Amino acid sequence: MARCFWLQFNENIKRPSGPMSTLPNGVDYTLKNYFDHWRKDGGLPPLLHDKLKGKRMRLLKDEALIAKFRSRSFGIFDKEAGAYFQGMLDDALELEDGSIIPLDNKTKGFPPGEEAHPAYGNQMSAYTLFLRENGIKTENSAYLVYWYLDHKHMDLERPLEFNVSLHKVNTNPDAALKTFREAVESLKEPMPASHKDCAFCSYRSLEP
């Protein structure tokens, strides 16, 4: 992974990509439209209402701010690293005290586990960092909304109907910034050695 990262940003050599399904993008657009529809009511979508009941939070109503969060311009320029750190957030929740925290959709083909994947925690920590550094009141938490299928307990009348599960994630924006700076610094070092378990390194080693 380190070698692939170095090659992409230093030599513009990217990992080869194969055909991609349009289904993930279709689900992404559908969910954003779903949230945007219910945002106008100043509350929560019906599928999330019971899961967040009593927590005194709602979808962020500011549509211009949501549009910014979803754009490639959402992020920061870190002077110490001399680089931009950016991402695209799906949505956000507004808490009772006016704080704004990340809300991100994840699709899975099976029920999620008890703990979020570490990569998701890192991602949400970065979003918390972006909010904080852009002067937006926030706290070190975020929510992941898993939209998943369950072939063992499916409704045979509607076999592709998604189940919904909500997971709260504790975020660490300072750790996200530290990781980003370390990643940028690694690009100034010599190219890392290939890794025996990396299929892409093995692929490149076959070049004449």
Image (cartoon, rainbow, N blue to C red):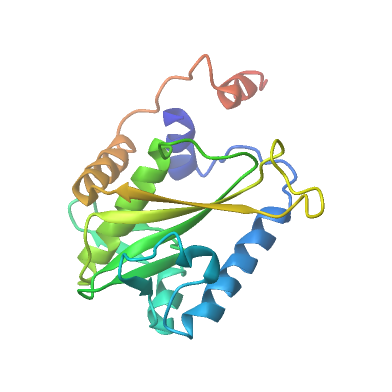
Q: In this view, which residue lies farthest toward the right?
A: 157
Residue at horizontal 20 percent and vertical 72 percent from the top? 135
Left or right of 46, for residue 87:
left
- In the figure, residue 98 lies in which quadrant? bottom left
Residue at horizontal 30 percent and vertical 50 percent from the top? 125
Residue at horizontal 27 percent and vertical 49 percent from the top? 171
Q: In this view, which residue lies farthest toward the top?
A: 196
Picture layout, residue 90 above or below residue 9: below
Q: Residue 137, image x and y in percent?
A: 20, 70
Q: Residue 5, image x and y in percent?
A: 45, 37
Between 105 and 184, the one lying in front of the other is: 105
Q: Residue 162, image x and y in percent?
A: 65, 54
Between 199 and 117, the one lying in front of the other is: 117
Q: Is residue 120 visible?
A: yes
Left or right of 184, for residue 133:
left
Left or right of 62, for residue 105:
right
Picture layout, residue 105 above or below residue 170: below
Between 147 and 87, the one lying in front of the other is: 147
- In the figure, residue 86 lies in which quadrant? bottom left
Picture layout, residue 130 above or below residue 177: below
Between 49 and 170, the one lying in front of the other is: 49
Total residue callouts:
0
Q: Is residue 83 visible?
A: no
Residue at horizontal 69 percent and vertical 40 percent from the top? 153
Q: Quadrant of the C terminus?
A: top right
